[in-house]
Amino acid sequence: MLGLYMNARNFVSTRLSREEKGATAVEYGIMVALIAVVIIVAVNLIGGSLSDAFDGVACELDKTGATAAGKTC
C-alpha cells in the first residue's frame, strides 16, 4: 500500500513540475512579445524626430545644401 502511494505521489509531482515548465515558457514568450511591441512603438514615435535631427546634422556637414536623400536644407 505504501508503494502504491509513493508511486502515485511521484507521478503527480512529475506531472506538476512538467506543467510549471510549460507555463514558464509561455510566460517568457509573452514577455518577449510585449518587449517587441514596446520597441516597435518607441522606434515609430522617435524615428521621425531622429530622422530630422540627422538631416540637420547632414546639412551642417554638407555646406552645399544637398543630402543623401535628395532633400535640401
Image (cartoon, helix red, strand yellow):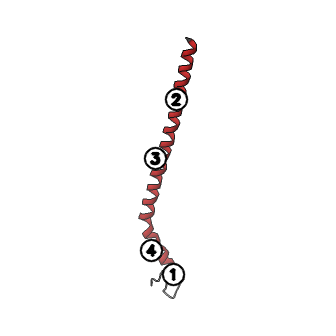
**Where does label 2 land, which residue?**
15
**Where does label 3 land, which residue?**
30
How packed mark 3 is, by other alpha carbons closer than 10 Å (few <14, some 14-19, many 20 or more), is few
The residues tagged by marks 2 and 3 sit, at their Cα atoms, a distance apart of 23 Å
Front one among 36 and 6:
6
Give the residue at x 48% y 42%: 26
**Quarter assignment of residue 73:** bottom left
Could you tell me the amino acid type at mark 1? Ala
Front one among 43 and 9:
9
Which callout, 1 or 3, points at the residue further toward the start of the chain? 3
Q: Nearer the viewer, mark 4 or mark 2?
A: 2
Q: Position of residue 32 (x, y in %)?
A: 49, 50
Could you tell me the amino acid type at mark 3? Ile
Q: How many marks?
A: 4
Q: Nearer the viewer, mark 4 or mark 3?
A: 3
Q: Position of residue 10 (x, y in %)?
A: 56, 23
The residues tagged by marks 4 and 2 sit, at their Cα atoms, a distance apart of 56 Å
Could you tell me the amino acid type at mark 2? Arg
Callouts 1 and 4 close, C-beta under 8 Å? no
Q: Position of residue 22 (x, y in %)?
A: 51, 38
The residues tagged by marks 1 and 4 sit, at their Cα atoms, a distance apart of 13 Å
**Where does label 4 land, which residue?**
52
Callouts 1 and 3 close, C-beta under 8 Å? no
The single residue placed furthest to the bottom in the displayed view is 64
Give the residue at x 44% y 65%: 46
The single residue placed furthest to the right in the displayed view is 3
Give the residue at x 45% y 82%: 71
The residues tagged by marks 2 and 1 sit, at their Cα atoms, a distance apart of 61 Å
Q: Is residue 12 above or below residue 3?
A: below
Callouts 4 and 2 close, C-beta under 8 Å? no
